[in-house]
Amino acid sequence: YIQQTMQISAMWNHSINFNLIYVALNLCGKDVNLTIQLLFAFEQWKFRDKNEQNYKKKKNEFLKRRCCNHNINLFAMFFSETHKKNATEFAAAVTINDGLPFVEKKIK
């Protein structure tokens, strides 16, 4: 996954969270082209209908479930709309059950 994640990240000028790419790769069965299409659809969705603002209103629901990666949580909302799943349960599943392999570097 690391090589594929780095490849996709480079295509997006390193503007997408590595864990988000990892989750999308898993959902797409490691198919890089399908993953890029999914991420493109997500990026478009993010800026439509105030979806980012809607996430900010629901952020605490995710945090209560220990889903602390806001990129994954927002993606979970996108995925839940298109696949009729519960967003917080999906985010919890990929965060806790599957694990997220990339750790963000804290900037002080």
Image (cartoon, helix red, strand yellow):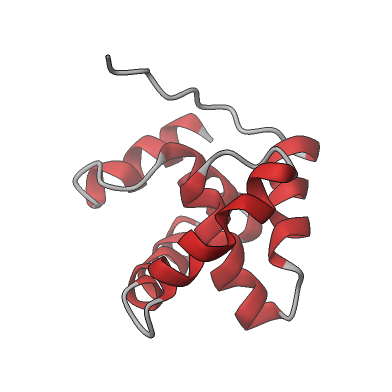
Using the image as rendered, state which of residue 86 and residue 36 is in the foreground: 86
Whether residue 37 is visible, yes or no, is no
Residue 84 shown left or right of residue 40 in the figure: right
Quarter of the image with the C terminus is top left
Which residue is depicted at the point 72% across and 58% down?
88
Q: 72 left or right of 50?
A: right
- Whether residue 19 is situated above or below residue 101 in the rendered picture: below
Q: Is residue 10 left or right of residue 80?
A: left
Q: Residue reaching furthest bottom?
A: 49
Give the image quarter of residue 59. bottom right
**Residue shown at 47% from the left, 60% from the top:** 56
Q: Which residue, as the protein is rendered here, is positioned at the far left?
A: 13
Q: Foreground: 57 or 25?
A: 57
Name the residue rendered at 54%, 43% in the picture: 22
- Dividing the picture into quadrants, the one containing residue 101 is top right
Residue 73 on image: x %, y %: 57, 54
Foreground: 105 or 27?
105
How many labels were placed on the picture?
A: 0
Q: Is residue 71 above or below residue 46?
A: above
Q: Compare residues 26 and 81 and report the one nearer the observer.
A: 81
x%, y% of residue 51? 43, 74
